[in-house]
Amino acid sequence: MRKVLEVEPGRSAAMSGRRSSSSLNARRRREEMERLAGGEPVDVVVIGGGITGAGVALDAASRGLRVALVERRDLANGTSRWSSKLVHGGLRYLRHLQVDVAWESARERDILMRRTAPHLVRPLRFVIGLDASMPPALAAFTEAGVRAGDALRIAAGTPSSLLPHPRRVRAEQAVREVPAMQRQGLRGAIEFWDGQLEDDARLVIAVARTAAARGARILTYCEAIEATCDRVRVRDALSGASFDIRTAHTVNATGIWAGRLAPGISLRPSKGVHVVVRSALLKDPGAALVVPVHGTGRWVFVIPASDGLTIIGTTDDAYGGEVPDEPGVSDDEATVLLAEVSPHLERPLRLEDVIGRYAGFRPLLSGGGSSTADLSRKHAIVSDPDTGVVTVVGGKLTTYRHMAEQTVDRVAGSGAPRSRTATLPLVGAAPPRLLQSLRAPGRLVRRYGAEAPAVASLGNGWPELLDPVARGVAALGVELVFGVEDEGALTVADLLDRRVRLGLVPAERAAAETAAEHLLQRGLAEPVSA
């Protein structure tokens, strides 16, 4: 796709013929940083650009508060992009009798699927094989849990037309959905439905852009180095300049790194490892396979994703020491995952089948459990008595909106307007029927929703921009342009790892690096190094 390397400066805005108040780019970042550095006050500074921080910024901005979000790197740089990409109803929490957490998950799943992000969250069928690992007693217990989860779905108002009732199916039906399943000894399967995210990083970006459309200042590569309730000292990572942001409230939403600004917070990090294989290797499954991990009460999922990929995960292991920005996955960790799922497949998976691997850290609140799998996925909102900074930590991606709502309730007080985010669509949101009628490539509709035609229009007169950015990858040239001009990407890593997600498969990322580098150098953004 040579033409993307030759796009003239400013081409994106000219081609699309529009500028949106939700657009994030280098120009907007510079202008808003200058105003804040010049003394413009805000009501709330949010520290952290993951899903929780973006959610807090949106909730506050949608109530009419003046908001600045600062993130030391890029949006979705940390844990928020390393999930299993599921929006789930919380079945695992029922096993630990955490009914309140499961109910919160089911309710928030309904909000995402039907109101705020139906373009990014879709139904996915799950299959639990009834084989030697699932004796009749365990199968009955598992089915009871699945049906309890379905009761929460009904209570949340999610229709069965969207997430059907669970049921038992014959072995033949299970194999049709998951063709690579081990047939020997398979008595049948339990089938249920849950929500799947197209891309967790895209959810974060959509939330941040929706906040920006309501006036929030979104400043990436801007690190908070000191914080009190009325002042946050920040450093622009690109220029090195430091300045103070005047504020009435400060929220620490830095997740697993919350202790850097709130030393009193006690966390027990849990590492979740995933590996990526080609779906063709598993005969292109139409459903996710659920595999019990013997003796733990946990499950490993084999999840078909977009672009011919399947994600296998996740582990839940306690982690000690400093948490890195880019967690690695060792051969041993990958081998453990493959060993869990291989007995349930006709063809065992080998390490050489793995084309990508990633890991994230869950910021779990310390508790009395012997393992991180026993710890609650509840969140906590804590005020520091010395600095007045409010820290929100714990929880999970599915429940980010409710966490944000409660956080803003805490900082804004009883006199503030009520939260609107349960009914506020994110940028690109539209009903499935409308999405199906859009005239745009299917990949764009899946990833940008109602904005897909606008993204595709960036190729008007430049059809090469509607081609893949490199041989063998799915991302299109218009996505790179849109990422720079409208989604705040400032670096090659921002584009490839968090806007089009080619970083999930390192070989695909490497193939697209030249296109991304030339795009930035041609002036569609102010080139930066970070």
Image: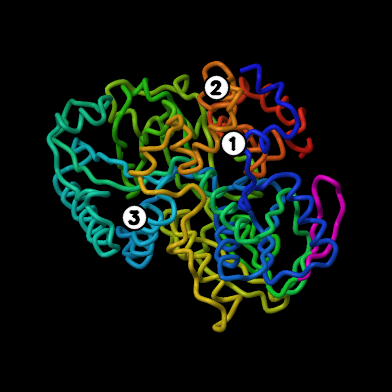
- Residue at screen point 55% across, 27% down: 476
Residue 132 in picture, x, y percent from top left = 19, 36
What crowding class fits label 2: few (fewer than 14 Cα within 10 Å), some (14-19), or many (20 or more)? some
- Residue at screen point 41% across, 54% down: 112
Q: In the image shown, does 92 or 135 lie closer to the viewer? A: 92
Nearer the camera: disc 1 or disc 2: 2
Q: Amino acid at mark 2?
A: Pro
Q: Amino acid at mark 3?
A: Gly
Residue at numbered disc 3: 89
Nearer the camera: disc 1 or disc 3: 3
Residue at numbered disc 1: 328
Mark drawn on residue 129: none
* Quarter in which the N terminus is drawn: top right
Q: Is residue 143 magenta?
A: no
The answer to whether 186 is drawn above or below residue 239 in the figure is: above
Q: In the image shown, does 363 or 124 lie closer to the viewer? A: 124
What crowding class fits label 3: few (fewer than 14 Cα within 10 Å), some (14-19), or many (20 or more)? many
- For the record, the magenta segment spans 233-246
Q: Amino acid at mark 1?
A: Gly
Residue at numbered disc 2: 468
For label 1, the SS is: loop
Residue 42 in picture, x, y percent from top left = 72, 69
Residue 378 in picture, x, y percent from top left = 45, 64
